[in-house]
Image (spheres, rainbow, N blue to C red):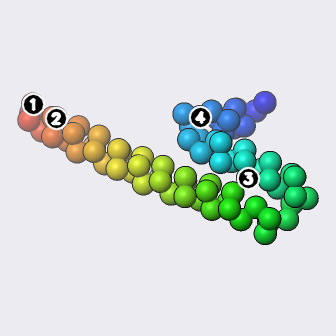
Amino acid sequence: MSRNVQRLRDHDTNPCLAETDASRQCMDDNNYRKDMCASYFLKYKNCRKFWTKHSAVGIAAEKSLLLCCTSNTL
């Protein structure tokens, strides 16, 4: 497996791995008819939206904590 594929298969890097696999399996099972897998795509989209927002909030909190602590020690 290439590094990029390994990274995408890592749950720490891709928290929506289960949704990814489920939507891909649905596509395989339904001869790649997207209309048959709409609910799986919606679950994946919601998962990505949640984790994108969650990671952005976490990064912002870490940055403010870092700025807070480094400015107090200067």
Separation of marks 1 and 2 at Cα, in angstroms? 5 Å
Q: Quadrant of the N terminus?
A: top right
Q: CA distance from mark 4 to mark 1?
A: 37 Å
Can you tell which of label 4 and label 1 is closer to the viewer?
A: 4
> At label 1, which amino acid type do we have?
Thr
Classify mark 2: residues with Cα within 10 Å, few (<14), some (14-19) or many (20+).
few
In the image, 63: left or right of 29? left
Label 4 sits on residue: 11
Q: Residue flagged by tag 2: what amino acid is it?
A: Thr
- Dot 3 or dot 1, earlier in sequence: 3
The residue tagged 2 is 70
Q: Position of residue 62 (x, y in %)?
A: 29, 40
Count residues near mark 1 (Cα–Cα under 10 Å), then give few for <14, some for 14-19, many for 20+: few
- Distance, label 3 to label 2, CA atoms, is 45 Å
**Residue type marked 4:** His
For the residues labelled 1 and 2, say whether their Cβ atoms are less than 8 Å apart: yes
Mark 3 to mark 1: distance in Å?
49 Å
In the picture of the structure, the residue carrying the numbered disc 1 is 73
In the picture of the structure, the residue carrying the numbered disc 3 is 23
- Identify the residue shown where x is 68% and y is 35%: 9
Identified by mark 3, the residue type is Ser
Q: Provide the secondary structure element on which disc 3 rests.
A: helix
The spot of residue 67 in percent (x, y) is 20, 41
Mark 1 falls on what kind of element? Answer: helix
Query: At 86% across and 51% down in the image, what residue appears?
Result: 28
Marked residue nearer the N-terminal end (4 or 1): 4
Look at the numbered discs 4 and 2 and tell me whether their residues touch, using CB distance below 8 Å: no
